[in-house]
Amino acid sequence: MDTIEAIKQQIDSNPIILYMKGSPNQPQCGFSAKASQALMGCGERFAFVDILSNPDIRAKLPEVGNWPTFPQLWVAGELVGGCDIICEMHDTGELQTLIKEAVAAQPAQ
């Protein structure tokens, strides 16, 4: 499986996935820290990929979503955006609504 296929599989198999530098508990940049904090504030589990330890994903992900920077939040297979958009949506309550809807749309496991 090539890197772009692997990225698409990650996005398809995770209702909420954050591509970031580091991890939510140990972010490696301020933007990733703010984005993961906003996402954790929604109270739902989410997947993440540390692009620093996955250089192939770091190189190819901008091609998938046509978005050049990190972090990148994907919800229900759609690119939401980066840190500024995530934080703005969190401040207005839109992020929590989007996250809750994505979780509710998932089949029970």
Image (cartoon, grey):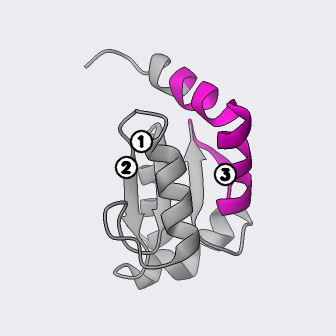
Q: Do tag 1 and tag 2 residues touch (Cβ < 8 Å)?
A: yes
3 relative to 90, above or below: below
Q: Nearer the viewer, mark 3 or mark 1?
A: 3
Q: How many angstroms separate mark 3 from mark 1 (CA)?
A: 21 Å
User: Image height check: is 73 above or below 104?
Assistant: below
* Mark sitting on residue 14: 1
Q: Earlier in the sequence, mark 1 or mark 2?
A: 1
Left or right side of 46 for 30: right
Give the mark nearest the N terminus, 3 or 1.
1
Look at label 1 and name its amino acid: Asn
Whole-percent x, y for residue 41 in the image: 47, 40
Q: Furthest-front residue in view? A: 91
Q: CA distance from mark 2 to mark 3?
A: 18 Å
Depth check, front residue: 44 or 107: 44
Q: Residue at x 40, y 41 (%)?
A: 13
- Image location of residue 58, percent across then percent down: 51, 78
In the image, which residues are magenta?
A: 76-101
Q: Secondary structure at mark 2?
A: strand
Dot 2 amino acid type: Ala
Q: Which mark is residue 47?
A: 2
Left or right of 1 on screen, residue 18: right
Residue topped by disc 3: 87
Residue at 45% x, 71% y is: 3
Quick one: label 2, few (<14), some, or many (20+) residues within 10 Å? Answer: some
Q: Is residue 41 above or below residue 58?
A: above
Magenta stretch prevailing secondary structure: helix
**Secondary structure of the residue carrying numbered label 3:** helix
Disc number at residue 31?
A: none
Q: Quadrant of the C terminus?
A: top left
